[in-house]
Amino acid sequence: MVHLDRYILNARVLPMLVVTLPLVLAAYPWLPAEAFAKDGLWTTAAKWATTGASSAFLATVLSFVPRAFGTRLEERLWREWGGAPATAYLRYAHPELDERQTAALHAKIAKIDPSLHVPSKAGEEDDPAAADQCYESMVRMLRARTWGPKNYPMLFDENLSYGFRRNLLGIRTIGILACLIGMGSGAAAIWQGHTAWPVIAIAAVVGAFVLANTPGDVRRQAERYARRLFMTVDLLKPAPKAKASGTATSKKALQEPPAKPA
């Protein structure tokens, strides 16, 4: 059973819908009118309704595909960018903040969760990989504390936009191939005397939309999400202290960073 929520619909189903629409449109000119109605406007309306419903169904069923390709792409992009944008934002070497601003941001995050280790500038320079691990823990904590549309809707919207762009870019090759199939089917139908110019037009527009979404767009959206994420630092309250129970389990729970939301 496919669980659907706002994130899944926008970040996974919608990119897949963009890809499946030209594929389903490829079959549109070849559907017999007799399968729907005799002639006229109702025949066309029935065909288009069937096309839309089929595209939506396929996109929902195959919504795992954009996520799989998108996360794989994300790993490659982060390597090319020198790390995740949110992690890079916390580095002293990041050009957007000066040393004083970076130190102040670190102090605010440490106040929210004192169990986090905050590297100094010298520590970051001595061991950048270890510092990045600390910054990743900070980001995971902030994501866990701010996840969901209820309390931080603007941050959630930025995350939706990033998920959509990342996943659409991940299935870009599939999308271009689907658009070519749709345009080819439309052209063949016109050659056979069918009215299929809308199929070619829609497939071309979808193809242009897929091509317009570039790695640069994904990076800029990731950076917008990172900025919005760190804007929430002033709104978050420190985690409540655990009751003194004297057990090792409680102490360990405080030291472990929160897991990244699904």
Image (tube, rainbow, N blue to C red):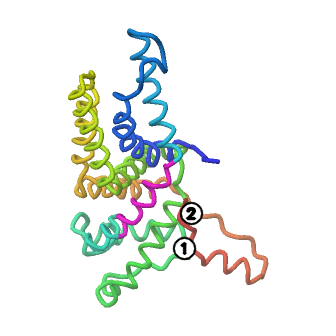
Give the residue number, with chain letter if any, for mark 2: 238
Residue 82 sits above or below residue 2 on the image: below
Label 2 sits on what residue type?
Answer: Pro
Label 1 sits on what residue type?
Answer: Pro
Nearer to the camera, 50 or 6: 50
| CB atoms of marks 2 and 1 within 8 Å | yes
Q: Is residue 100 magenta?
A: no
Give the residue number, with chain letter if any, for mark 1: 114
Nearer to the camera, 244 or 253: 253
Residue 109 sits above or below residue 228 on the image: below
The stretch of residues the image draws in magenta is 62-75
Residue under the point 75% across and 75% down:
244
Nearer to the camera, 254 or 30: 30
Instruction: Find numbered disc 2 in the image and state the secondary structure of the residue it sits on.
Output: loop
Q: Is residue 69 magenta?
A: yes
Residue under the point 34% across and 36% down:
26
Instruction: Rate crowding at label 1 as few (under 14), some (14 to 19) or many (20 or more) other CA atoms within 10 Å.
Output: some
Residue 141 sits above or below residue 185 on the image: below
* Left or right for 18, reference 189: right
| Image disc number at residue 233 | none
* Left or right for 164, reference 261: left
Instruction: Rate crowding at label 2 as few (under 14), some (14 to 19) or many (20 or more) other CA atoms within 10 Å.
Output: few
